[in-house]
Amino acid sequence: MAPLSQSTGYLLWRQGQKVRWLSETIPAAEPRPESGGLPPSAELVGQHLALNRYTGPARLALFHARAGVSEHGGTAIADAHLLLGILKAAPELGPLMRPTVNIQRLSECLVGAVAAPTLLPTSVDVPFDPAVKAALLEAPRVADRFGQFDMTPAHLFLAVLEQPPSAAAECLRSAGIDLATTTEAVAAFARGGP
C-alpha cells in the first residue's frame, strides 16, 4: 500500500541551489528496514531535499550560516559558514571540543576562511557549496546511526567533520582541536550521553 501524502510546509533544497520554505504535497516516507523502521534519512523528491527532520536549533544553525554570508562575505554557504552557524545556534557544543580551545580564536579563523570583499544582502538567494550539500545529506545518516529521527546541531557538526579536508577542518586543526577526540565527545553528546 502506498504511503499517504502529507501536505505541509517544508524547507527545501531546490535543484541543489537554494533554501526556501515551500508548502506543497510530498509523499510520506516509507520506513527503511535497515534503519530500524525509521523513515529515509531525507525525503528526496525529484531534485528536492526536505529538511523536515531538522530541529529548531538545527534550522537556526542554517539561518546563521546564511546570515554569515551577508555578514562576512562569500558567494555560497561554505562549510566554515555552516560551522559558525552551528556554534552560534548551539553554544553547548563548544565545550565538547578537545582539548578545550578558545572559541573566539576559532571563530576568527572561520571568518578569515570565508571573508570576501563583497557582502550579499540577505534578500539574495545563496547556494550551498558542494561540501555543505554533502554535510546536509550526511546529517540525517548520522542521526540514523544513533537511532534518532530528529537532527540536531550536533548531527550537523559531526556531518561537517566527516567531510573531506576543508577550510572548517583546517581552522579546527589550527585551533589545536583533536578531530577524533572531538568527534567522539560530540557523538556521545548527540546520543544523549555525558
Image (tube, helix red, strand yellow):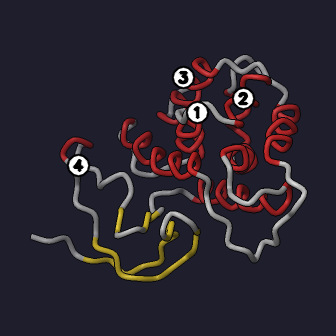
Image height check: is 115 above or below 107? below
Residue 170 tag number = 2
Label 1: state its secondary structure. Answer: helix
**Which quadrant would the C terminus be assigned to in this image?**
top right
Q: Where residue 97 appears, x then y in whole percent? A: 69, 25
Query: Looking at the picture, which amino acid does disc 1 mark?
Result: Leu
Q: Are marks 1 and 4 in contact (CB under 8 Å)?
A: no
Residue 161 tag number = 1
Lower position in the chain sequence, tag 2 or tag 1: 1
Lower position in the chain sequence, tag 3 or tag 2: 2
Residue at 53% over, 45% down: 135
Q: Are marks 3 and 1 in contact (CB under 8 Å)?
A: no
Other residues around mark 2 within 10 Å, as few (<14) / some (14–19) / many (≥20): some
Q: How many angstroms separate mark 3 from mark 1 (CA)?
A: 11 Å
Other residues around mark 3 within 10 Å, as few (<14) / some (14–19) / many (≥20): some
**Residue sticking out furthest to the left:** 1
Residue at 22% over, 60% down: 30
Q: Which residue is mark 4?
A: 37
Lower position in the chain sequence, tag 4 or tag 2: 4
Q: Nearer the viewer, residue 17 or 24?
A: 17
Which label sits in the foreground, 2 or 1?
Answer: 2
Q: Where residue 136 appears, x then y in whole percent? A: 51, 51
Q: Which residue is mark 3?
A: 184
Q: Going by the image, does 95 lie left or right of 143? A: right
